[in-house]
Amino acid sequence: MGRTYTTNLKLSNPDSGECNWDVDWHRNQTIKDVVEKQMMMRNFIFTGGALSYGGSGTLIAYSLGRAQVADVSYDFGAGTLTMAFAAAGETVMNFIYINSSGVASISISQPIGDYTLLGIADSDESGEMVRVSDLRAYEIGTTEPFVENMALNGTFDLWEYAITQTSSGYGSDNRFKNLNTGSTKVHSMQDFTPGQTDVPGNPKHFSRTVVTSVAGSANRVFKKTRLLDISRFAGKQIAVIFYAKADSSKDISLSYSKVYGDGGTAGDYAVEIETIALTATWAKYKAFFDVPNNAGKTLGDLSYFTLDIYFDAGSDFDSVTNTLGQQSGTFDIAEYQVYETANKRELSVLRPALLEIKRECHKYRVSLSTLRSRFYSAATSAYEWYFTFAYNEMIQAPDVLIEATQVGLTGNPTLVEALPYHLTLSAEKTSTPGIGEFNTDVTLDAEL
C-alpha cells in the first residue's frame, strides 16, 4: 500500500524580498527528502501524534497515538520534548519521531534506520518554536484492520453460572475456568463506573480474583480459557492483549499450551511463558506468542489452545510460571483479547454485542428453562412417553443436568439421549387415566 499525508503538510514560503531565501529552500528540500523516505518505508501512523506548542518556552508537545515502525505497532502516550537552541539570529530544525523501540524522540539530525516521523519543528536561539510541519504518514485506503476476538467472552459481559465463585473450575464468567488447589480464592464480577477512562471501549464488567495464598508446593490459583481447534493457531503469531491491575505491584504469569484432542498426540504445556509486572493502576499488557506448526503431531477430536494466567503458584509449578511463587492479593483483568497477527502488530478488535457473545458461548454451555409438556393418557397401566427438544448445535454431545417437577407421573422425566443438537426425555404416566405434566429446567454442558 502507498502512503498519504495530512493536509497540514506545508512547505515554507520565503517572505517577499527575503534575502535568505536559501534557508527556506534548504528546509523544503529536507522535508521532501524525509517524505520520500517515509513513502518507501514500512512505517506510518495509525492515529494521533499531532504536534503543538508545549506550554513552556523550549517544549513541543505530541498527542497520544499509535505508530507502526518496521512492521511492529506501538502505542505511545502524550508527552513533551525539549527543542534545541539555534545560533543567534538563526533557526534549527528539530526532527520529532517515534523510534524503533516505539519511543517519541527528538533530534537536530535526520534520523536513520527505522522510525516514523511526526514532524519537523523549527526553534530559535531561545529554543522556542517558530513553526512546525506535520509529517505524519498514513496508509492509503486502510485504517487499522479489525479482527475478531478468539477469546469468547473476553469482554466479561456474560456470567451465566454466577457472579461470584469460590469453587475450582467453571462457575462464574462463561468460557473461563477459575481454578485453585490448596490456596483459596473468591472470583467475582465487578462493574466499571460509567464514564471511566482508565480502560477504553466503555466496558461494563471486569474479572476480579482475590487470592488467599496457603503455603504448599502443590498449591496454586489461576485463570484459564480454552480456544477450540489448535489448527487455527499452528504456525501463527498470536497476540494476547488485556488490561489488568493488582492491589499493589505484583507479578503474574501468562502461558499457552497446545492440547491435540481425544486420540491425538500428548499435549505440549507451557510452551511459552511471559512474566507480567502489574501495578495498582489499570494498564494495558501485551504478549506475542509464535506458535509452532503441528508437524509430526496427530490431531484428535476437540483439540484446543489454552491460555493460563497464574496469580499464585507453589514450587511444583516453577517450570510453567517462570518461578512466580506464592502470593495473596487482588487481581483484576479486563478486555481480554486473543487474535492472529504478524510482526507483533497490534490490531483493533471487533466488540461483539451481548447477543453474539451468548450465541457463541451457548455452543459450550446453555440452560434451557422450563421445558414443559402436558399430555393425556387413557391407559389403565403405566405408559411411557418420549419427548424431543431441539437447540442450536453445540461443539459436542453435552452432559445434562435435569431439575423437574411433575404431576401424574411415576417419577420425574429421565434422559434418554443427548446429542449436540437435541435431547430426548422419557416420562411415564401412572396407571390412572388422566393428565400427566412436567416442568423441567435443563442445563447442557459441552465445555472443554
Image (spheres, rainbow, N blue to C red):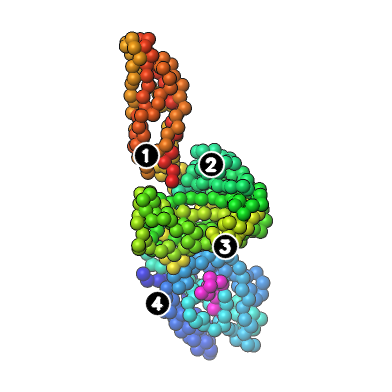
Image: 298 above or below 389: below
Residue under numbered circle 4: 40
**Is the residue marked by circle 3 packed among few (<14), some (14-19), or many (20+) residues within 10 Å?**
some
Q: Amino acid at mark 3?
A: Asn
Q: Are marks 1 and 4 in contact (CB under 8 Å)?
A: no
Residue ID at (33%, 21%):
385
Residue ID at (48%, 80%):
113
Task: Answer whether residue 16 is visible to the viewer in this image.
Answer: no
For the residues labelled 3 and 4, the Cα–Cα distance comes to 41 Å
Image: 326 above or below 83: above
Q: Position of residue 378 (x, y in %)?
A: 32, 10
Q: Are marks 1 and 2 in contact (CB under 8 Å)?
A: no
Residue 96 lies in the magenta-colored region: yes
Q: Amino acid at mark 1?
A: Ala
Q: Amino acid at mark 2?
A: Ser
Q: Nearer the viewer, mark 3 or mark 4?
A: 3
The label number, if any, that marks residue 172 in the structure image? 2
Tell me which numbered mark, 3 or 4, is placed earlier along the sequence: 4
Decide which of 93, 235 is in the foreground and name it: 235
For the residues labelled 2 and 3, the Cα–Cα distance comes to 28 Å
Decide which of 39, 368 is in the foreground and name it: 368
Q: Amino acid at mark 4?
A: Met
Q: For the image shown, how many numbered marks are present on the structure?
A: 4
Secondary structure beneath disc 1? Answer: loop
